[in-house]
Image (cartoon, rainbow, N blue to C red):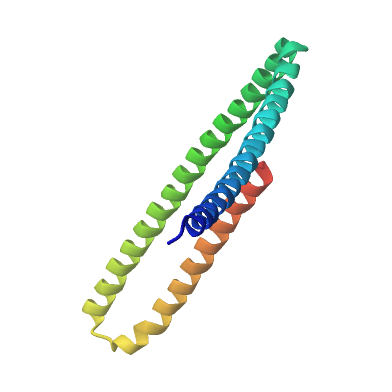
Amino acid sequence: MTPMRDILEDARKLSRRLRSHDVALDRLIGSAEDNLKRIQSLKQYQEAQDQPNSVGSSKLRTQIVLDLQKVNHHIRELQQENMELRAALEDHQKATELIMSKYRQHLSHLVNSSKIDTSIVQAPLQGVRNIISIYLTHTLDQVVRHLLSSQ
């Protein structure tokens, strides 16, 4: 190669490097601008946060504490009511279980003592099941209405 070609080749290489450095520099400038915007928005956010704290922060805190106390009281009331409703539901379930066990005992006693056909017993049994189903549905409706009315 001739010295002139070497010089031209070196100039091309330098030109390519300058272009790649220029692209990298543009990226760095864009990144720096983005970071500057973030910093400015964070400063604005901090100023906005500091402003209410300097103006009547004790009044604001007092109001927040009062509101939290009201909410906590309401939550405690709801928890107590929830416990009472669960206890009532449990009582109803136990009563229903007791009624069903007594019914089964009486029915088995009747079947065993009279040796009647079991197909005759199935119809009243289905009727009792329907009555119990209606009773449970009615009881659950009352519980739900009570819950909704207390809210």
The number of callouts visible is 0
Q: Quadrant of residue 119?
A: bottom left
Q: Is residue 8 above or below residue 114?
A: above
Q: Is residue 147 above or below residue 98?
A: above
Q: Nearer the viewer, residue 26 or 54?
A: 26
**Quarter of the figure with the C terminus:** top right
Which residue sits at x=50%, y=59%? 5
**Left or right: 147 in relation to 60:** left
Q: Residue at x 45, y 43 (%)?
A: 87
Residue 122 lies left or right of residue 115; in this view the side is right
Image side of residue 106 versus residue 91, left or right: left
The residue sitting at 46% across, 77% down in the picture is 127
42 lies above or below 142: above
Q: In screen coordinates, is 97 left or right of 139?
A: left
Residue 147 % position (x, y): 61, 47
Q: Position of residue 84 (x, y in %)?
A: 50, 39
Image quarter where the N terminus lies is bottom left
> Observer-nearest residue: 96 or 72?
72
Name the spot of residue 76 as percent of width and height, x first: 55, 30
Q: Residue furthest right?
A: 55
**Which of the pair 124/16 is nearer the observer?**
16
Say which quarter of the image contains residue 8: bottom right
Looking at the image, is 74 positioned above or below residue 122? above
